[in-house]
Amino acid sequence: MNTRDCGHIISGSSPAKGEAGKTGEWRTQRPVLNREKCLAVKANKDICYQCWAFCPECAIERKPGGPVDLTYCKGCGICAQICPADAIQMENEYDSSEQRKND
Ligand code: SF4
Ligand code: SF4
């Protein structure tokens, strides 16, 4: 059993970071945060965190704009699907690496 900030008891799992192991090089997409849309970043408060709560790999840090640990992120896209503010976009790994080379 876990408790939320409001004190209500909820059922919930607490997966360890990277429970399925390191991703290696097979991920085809990665999540990219648009900080201008993220509710937690905009309010600079511990709010929302749906992305953190639903990530099966616990790869997202629980803080506003919390970075994604790409060592464990599988690129499943759940965080992008669940985000109520449409603040996470999935980018192709190939595009991302090309973009990084040009940064
Ligand atoms: S679910 Fe979306 S809006 Fe909420 S904290 Fe995560 S990125 Fe920000
Ligand atoms: S793409 Fe999947 S594994 Fe990666 S941070 Fe989002 S929910 Fe977690």
Image: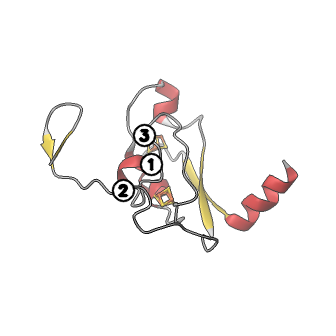
Residue found 24% across the figure and 32% down from its top: 5
User: What secondary structure is marked by label 1?
Assistant: loop
User: What secondary structure is marked by label 3?
Assistant: loop
Badge number at residue 83: 1
| Amino acid marked by disc 1 | Cys
User: Crowding at label 3, few (<14), some or many (≥20) Cα neighbours within 10 Å?
Assistant: some
- Answer whether labels 3 and 2 touch (C-beta < 8 Å): no
What's the distance in space between the residues labelled 1 and 2, CA to CA? 21 Å
Residue 67: image x %, image y %? 55, 44
Residue 49 quadrant: top left
Q: Tell which tag, 3 or 2, sits nearer the viewer.
A: 2
Q: Which residue is mark 3?
A: 62
Q: Tell which tag, 1 or 2, sits nearer the viewer.
A: 2
Q: Colour scheme of this structure image? A: secondary structure
User: What secondary structure is marked by label 2?
Assistant: loop
Residue found 44% across the figure and 61% down from its top: 18
- The tag earlier along the polypeptide, 1 or 2, is 2
Badge number at residue 4: none
Report whether the residue tagged 1 is closer than 8 Å to ligand 1.
yes
Q: Which residue is mark 2?
A: 16
Residue 56: image x %, image y %? 39, 61
Residue found 48% across the figure and 25% down from its top: 44
- Answer whether labels 1 and 3 touch (C-beta < 8 Å): no
Q: Determine whether 68 is above or below 57 in the image.
A: above
| Amino acid marked by disc 3 | Arg
